[in-house]
Image (cartoon, rainbow, N blue to C red):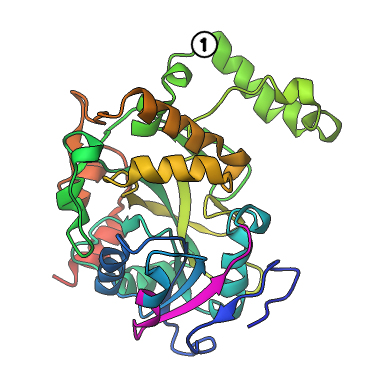
Amino acid sequence: MTTPSSLCHVLLERLTDPPGAAATREIRAFSGCRNERLRLPAFLRHYRALGVERFFIVDNDSSDGTTEYLAEQPDVHVFRTTNRFHEARYGTDWLNALLAEYGIGCWCVTVDIDEMLVYPGSEQASLRTLTAYLDRNDYEALSCLLLDLYPSGPLKESSYHPGDDLLAAAPYFDPGPYRQMSIDLCPGVLVRGGMRERIFYPEFRARTLGARIYDTLLNRVVLRVPFLRDMPRLQAQRRPTPPCLTKVPLVLWDQTSTYLNCTHWVSRKIVAPETGCLLHFKFLHDFHARAVHEAVRGEHYDAATEYRRYAEKLVQDPDISLMYEGSSRYEGTTRLIGLGLMHDSTAWSDARMKLM
């Protein structure tokens, strides 16, 4: 399959024969991956249970059996590219190309392989029930918090095998703090905080009020001026910032839809007032090796500065544990609602209660 150059800069080799857009409004999942054989069985099991009917996955030159495993799955349509991740805007172009060809008219779940979508009541209410509710209320998207999950002990001693329960292996998360700021990209909010800020960006959390004001002015005013944003001296003033935790993984896709930066921001949509979480299972026993590898490969955002920071921390403390006195064990979506990490509504609660 050759995708239009305006959407994607690569040739995607079709390994299975995908259908066109479904008149029945299938719920479809889209993802990109590289060497994710460890997590794929749990990923597919989770989304099949939620109600995803087909998967469209771009494999970026995996060498661990990922491609072969995906090609064996009857509901997975896998595409392979050997092109460079950063040249496709960190995979955004690949996903937009597949969504434009196979997502229009469908509710589309676009997530990484290490991200598991949950939303208020998702233990009982399927994606079909949720999207029917969103349709009735003319909502076009659901935004989520990316919530990092981690094991109870040192990362290198955690044990996980393909097909195991991810929550059993990594059941803990930081209940806070998380900070929100408004932004002029859909869904209108930027969230930072949580475990990765605590462990890998402690100096960012410890900033004074003056430093926070300075950073806000620099990033939201000065660096938005076209002739200033590319000045090396001003760029050098930017402080390393922890990852953005805003995601928009569930979208009713149409001809005007596009992701702007991975799945952090999407073209203008009517976003539901309810929110979900993406349980993020990056932090297993393979994290150290993956961080070092990606730091050297340099294909992620900003020449992989985030992965270089991970690798440096892990070299300093190879026995690192991500736990602290405030760590909370995942106990379901009701607990996340109570902590304010996802938002429910009376309307959605009533809609799903009718199923019980």
200 sits to left or right of 318 = right
Above or below, comparing residue 224 to residue 130 in the picture: above
Please report the residue visible at 47 percent of the width from the left and 30 percent of the height from the top. Answer: 309
- Which image quarter holds the N terminus? bottom right
Q: Residues within 10 Å of mark 1 (few under 14, many from 20)?
A: few
- Amino acid, disc 1: Leu
- Asked if residue 340 lies in the magenta stretch, the reply is no
Residue 347: percent from the left, percent from the top?
31, 59
- Please tell me whether residue 81 belongs to the stretch shown in magenta: yes
Callout count: 1
Which image quadrant for residue 197? top left
Residue shown at 48%/55% (left/top)?
A: 248
Element class at badge 1: helix
Up the image or down, 7 lies above or below 186; here it is below
Q: Residue at x 47, y 86 (%)?
A: 16
For residue 14, side relative to residue 31 (left or right): right
x and y percentages locating residue 237 in the rendered image? 68, 19
Q: Is residue 9 above or below residue 219?
A: below
Residue name at image x 55 percent, y 80 percent: 102
Q: Quadrant of residue 97?
A: bottom right
48 and 121: which is toward the camera: 48
Tell me which segment is drawn in magenta: 69-84
In the rendered image, which quarter contains the C terminus?
A: bottom left
The picture quadrant where one finds residue 101 is: bottom right
Camera-side residue of 170 and 155: 155
From the top left corner, tell me how far across and down residue 156 is, in percent: 24, 39
Q: Position of residue 26 (x, y in %)?
A: 42, 82
Instruction: Name the residue that disc number 1 marks.
Output: 209
